[in-house]
Image (cartoon, rainbow, N blue to C red):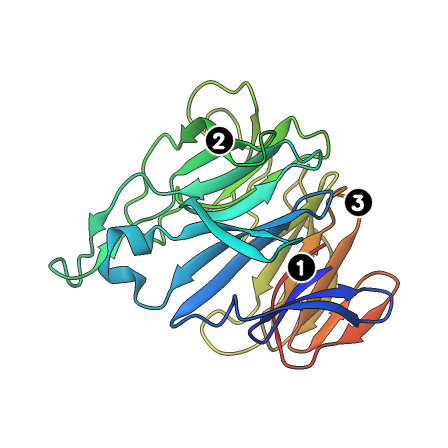
Amino acid sequence: AMVIDGQSLVIVDVAGGERLKVFDPYFDGDGMSVGRMSLMPDASALYYGVGWEDSWFSCDASQGQIWKLDLAFGITSPISPGYNPSVSPDGRWMAALISEQCLPDPEEPEFWVLTPTDTVVLYDLTSGWPIETDRWSVETPPTTYNDPQMLQWVDWRADSQTMLVMNNGGEVYELPLDHIGPADAGPALAEGIFGFPQGVIGDTLFATVNETPQAVGTFDLFAFDLNTGLPSGEIAESVGWVYASVDTTRTRLIWGHDTQVATAETAFFLETYLSSLAW
């Protein structure tokens, strides 16, 4: 698995937590934060989202960036604007979220901007470098980060032919590769899932839920049934944010919080603290 332990990206053996390789100093830039990571099935490269502490002052910075790390040579390359990269299980495609708008922030319209994510972008990875092949925007563009229409997550079905997208309103939509129309067109596959999605296996969506949204409190990792939108089980509970990821085959789950990481079979501890996962 790939874990961000403090400010280091580490390849670990999930059987016992042995640190096999450490990449430094890619993840300790000034004011830089790393979001979702997505691994190529052959472990040749890692794609990840990057944001910045003062991103609300600039349209370009607020839109974030997607970077690629070549795992053989340790070379990083910025790819495109956006967030939430997700490589398909067969390694041919990558989906990501971007904002096609930059709005003045009502609180400080002369200085701050809003870029709520409203578009899914599809990249072809067969050449070794992501090439944009299609994009789908939502029917009603969101105007704030709390807007129910804002997209917060995209991932793949195991067949690599269909994406799943979820908005702030807890609605999940299927998005086939040949989809025509808005990203959220048609009836939702599931509704009322209020949590931050982390991965999907079959018809089970794993999401982190803040059980006490008005205060610092309990964060849970729940399994949701995509056929009903209802929670089907609790995986983990913590006072810190719970991270999770599915492996590249979309059959196994890894999760962690604070300094502990676990799968269904094993558990191990990190040296500092966890801030992202890929498997």
Residue 141 percent across, percent down from the top left: 31, 37
Q: Nearer the viewer, mark 1 or mark 2?
A: 2
Q: Nearer the viewer, mark 3 or mark 2?
A: 2
The answer to whether any part of residue 206 appears in the image is yes
Residue 98 percent across, percent down from the top left: 40, 42
Q: Estimate how packed mark 1 is, as few (under 14), some (14 to 19) or many (20 or more) residues with alpha carbons within 10 Å.
A: many
Q: Estimate how packed mark 2 is, as few (under 14), some (14 to 19) or many (20 or more) residues with alpha carbons within 10 Å.
A: some
Q: Amino acid at mark 1?
A: Ala
For the residue labelled by badge 2, is the local secondary structure a helix, a strand or a loop? strand
- 97 sits left or right of 228 in the view: left
Q: Is residue 80 above or below residue 48?
A: above
The image quarter containing residue 101 is top left
In the rendering, which numbered label is found on residue 272? none
* Residue depicted at x 38% and y 71%: 31
Return the residue at label 1.
244
Q: Is residue 7 above or below residue 65?
A: below
- 217 sits left or right of 237 in the view: left
Q: Are marks 3 and 2 in contact (CB under 8 Å)?
A: no
Q: Estimate how packed mark 3 is, as few (under 14), some (14 to 19) or many (20 or more) residues with alpha carbons within 10 Å.
A: few
The image quarter containing residue 260 is bottom right
**Hey, which residue is sitting farthest left in the picture?**
110
Residue 183 percent across, percent down from the top left: 46, 30
Return the residue at label 3.
251
Q: Are marks 1 and 2 in contact (CB under 8 Å)?
A: no
The image quarter containing residue 61 is bottom left
Return the residue at label 2.
131
Q: CA distance from mark 1 to mark 2?
A: 28 Å
Q: CA distance from mark 3 to mark 2?
A: 27 Å
Q: Amino acid at mark 3?
A: Thr
Q: Between 189 and 251, which is closer to the camera in this rendering? A: 251
- If you read the primary sequence from the N terminus, does the residue marked by circle 3 or circle 2 appear first? 2
